Image (tube, grey):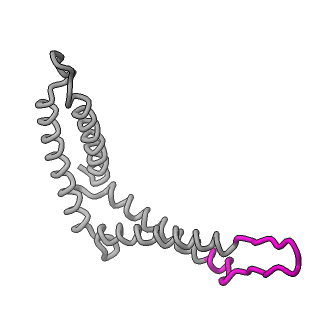
Amino acid sequence: MKLAEALQVRKDLKIKLGNISKRLENNARVQEGEAPLEDPKDLLNELEITADQLEDIIGKINLANAKTLVDGHSLTELMAKREVLSLKISYLKSFSYEASDIVDRATGSEIKIKSTVSVPELQKKIDSLSKEYREVELKIQETNWITEI
């Protein structure tokens, strides 16, 4: 199984667990004399089996991410880099938005508000980080589709 397939299986198992949880909630109580639509014992068993499958696939994914090297770095390190780049881009975009916000003055005697940074330079930094993010993301995706677990 390719790493990319394992990631999809992990996602599907998480969704399945959520659905089982909701089904359990829906069958937790019934009116006296009535039977639940689904047997909670069967649902609890299904929950246990699915959780075990999820634990197994997560372990395999984590091992593959730690062992798989791309340009001398583990896939885990690349994912950390991607996450941090995403945060930096997000924070810099927010800062850029605030720095470029124009404050209108009703009269010439009102206090003038100006940016504390060069917005064009800040935008160049955001563009550079965004390009780096795309390149890291591409490496991760390529690796996911060629790595066997």
Quarter of the figure with residue 75: bottom left
Q: Position of residue 23 (x, y in %)?
A: 25, 32
Residue occupying the point 20% across, 28% down: 29
Residue occupying the point 65% across, 83% down: 117
Left or right: where 109 falls relative to 22: right
Residue occupying the point 31% across, 76% down: 72
Left or right: where 135 falls relative to 15: right
Quarter of the figure with residue 13: top left
Q: Position of residue 84 (x, y in %)?
A: 42, 72
In the rendered image, residue 8 lying in the magenta stretch gets the answer: no
Q: Which residues are magenta?
A: 101-124
Residue most extreme to the top = 33
Quadrant occupied by the C terminus: bottom left
Quarter of the figure with residue 102: bottom right
Q: Position of residue 1 (x, y in %)?
A: 23, 49
- Marks counted in the figure total 0
On screen, 139 above or below 88?
above
Left or right: where 55 falls relative to 144: left
Secondary structure mainly formed by the magenta segment: loop
On screen, 64 above or below 104?
above
Residue most extreme to the front = 32
**For this rendering, which residue is in front, 10 or 70?**
10
Residue occupying the point 55% across, 73% down: 92
Q: Position of residue 114 (x, y in %)?
A: 73, 81
In the rendered image, residue 122 lying in the magenta stretch gets the answer: yes
